[in-house]
Image (cartoon, rainbow, N blue to C red):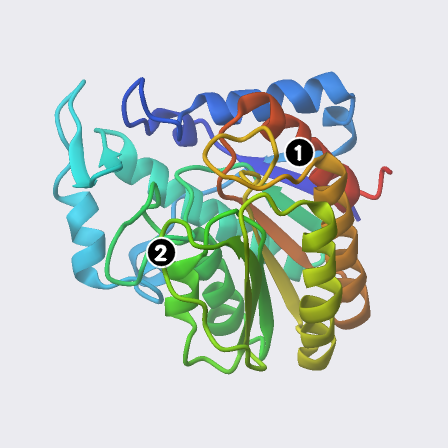
């Protein structure tokens, strides 16, 4: 079996203005680095479908969906959802495509068609709450994929790993009372979205770290907190909110990770997946706004997923 990279041109059509860091250039930078690295031809490329309404309703309210669908602006215009989250005429289609792609990757991995997948999709998702968009995020792609595995495929336990610099508040809210889901993350604190750290439980291992934390601090979090929780939980599938804005070159965060840290984390997650989840992993792009660092970090992540190191 192979590693697949999922994406779609629709994900390039959502944009929020030339000033906005969450831009279509992020996906172009990833593609450029994958080609430059020489691994693009060693992984399978696939496109994802549009998400359908019943699947969206597993995680989002009708009002949250309608807010996007019914407020699409005219050509060249933007509709603000919050201070830094806007939509253009293509945003609803892009959000449907991103969510549908994450679920299609889930289908393929569970079918045994591929070993694992990285979804190069946008808009990102982990801030999107069940009741509405937030923080550059429209629909919560990882949450929808996890619910698809649970409710669509009948899995009993899944884990969501989030290594974005920001707390995945939307994901945490979606699964706070769901014993079928373990969420494990680190996040810079205090920092956007300014949520307070949650108590560590068997299903919630979200660890705040201070600004300027580097690879040593994050590796300690993984070894001390994530891995024991994951092995105790024994997930049947693992989802990754793959944000790369904790990189030391990314100005939207204040942490100090480098490419080798992302590769190391990916290998730790893969080891857990091999032991408990038949190797099944779906990773979805979240943050990462320095284009060069983003592309290089995704290459490191995908190389580890494809066991090319």
Q: CA distance from mark 2 to mark 1?
A: 26 Å
Q: On the picture, is 83 further left or further right than 265? A: left
Give the numbered dot on residue 9. none
- Residue identifier under label 2: 194
Q: Return the x and y of residue 137 as percentages of the image width and height.
A: 35, 45
Would residue 114 be visible to someone looking at this image? Answer: no
The structure residue drawn at horizontal position 54% and vertical position 23%, both measured from the top left corner, is 291
Give the numbered dot on residue 297. 1
Q: Return the x and y of residue 212 as percentages of the image width and height.
A: 59, 43
Closer to the chain start, of discs 2 and 1, is 2
Q: On the picture, is 308 further left or further right than 305? A: right
The structure residue drawn at horizontal position 37% and vertical position 68%, both measured from the top left corner, is 173
Q: Return the x and y of residue 125 as percentages of the image width and height.
A: 41, 49
Q: Return the x and y of residue 62 as percentages of the image width and height.
A: 19, 61
Compared to residue 19, the image places residue 48 above or below, namely below
Q: On the picture, is 244 further left or further right than 223? A: left
Q: For residue 140, which quarter of the picture? A: bottom left
Compared to residue 33, the image places residue 304 above or below, namely below
Front-most of residues 92 and 248: 248
Q: For residue 50, which quarter of the picture? A: top left
Q: On the picture, is 220 further left or further right than 53? A: right
Would residue 35 be visible to someone looking at this image? Answer: yes
The structure residue drawn at horizontal position 32% and vertical position 26%, both measured from the top left corner, is 15
């Amino acid at each position: 079996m192979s590693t697949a990279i999922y994406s779609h041109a629709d994900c390039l059509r959502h944009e929020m203005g030339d000033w906005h860091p969450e831009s279509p250039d992020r996906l172009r930078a990833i593609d450029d680095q994958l080609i430059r690295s020489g691994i693009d031809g060693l992984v399978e490329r696939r496109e994802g479908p549009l998400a359908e309404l019943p699947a969206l309703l597993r995680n989002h309210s009708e009002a949250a969906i309608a807010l996007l669908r019914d407020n699409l602006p005219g050509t060249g215009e933007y509709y603000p959802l919050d201070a830094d989250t806007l939509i253009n005429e293509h945003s609803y289609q892009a959000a449907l495509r991103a969510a549908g792609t994450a679920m299609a990757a889930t289908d393929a991995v569970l079918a045994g068609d591929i070993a694992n997948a990285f979804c190069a999709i946008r808009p990102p998702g982990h801030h999107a709450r069940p009741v509405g968009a937030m923080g550059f995020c429209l629909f919560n792609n990882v949450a929808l994929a996890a619910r698809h595995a649970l409710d669509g495929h009948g899995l009993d336990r899944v884990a969501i790993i989030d290594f974005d610099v920001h707390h995945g508040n939307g994901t945490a809210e979606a699964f706070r009372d769901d014993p079928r889901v373990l969420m494990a993350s680190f996040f810079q604190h205090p920092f956007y979205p300014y949520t307070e750290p949650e108590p560590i439980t068997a299903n919630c291992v979200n660890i705040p770290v201070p600004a300027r934390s580097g690879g040593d601090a994050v590796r300690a979090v993984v070894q001390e907190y994530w891995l024991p929780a994951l092995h105790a939980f024994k997930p049947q599938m693992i989802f990754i909110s793959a944000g790369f804005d904790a990189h030391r070159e990314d100005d939207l965060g204040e942490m100090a990770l480098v490419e080798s840290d992302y590769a190391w984390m990916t290998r730790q997650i893969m080891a857990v997946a091999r032991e408990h989840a038949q190797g099944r992993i779906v990773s979805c792009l979240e943050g990462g706004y320095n284009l060069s660092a983003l592309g290089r970090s995704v290459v490191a992540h995908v190389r580890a997923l494809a066991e090319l190191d």
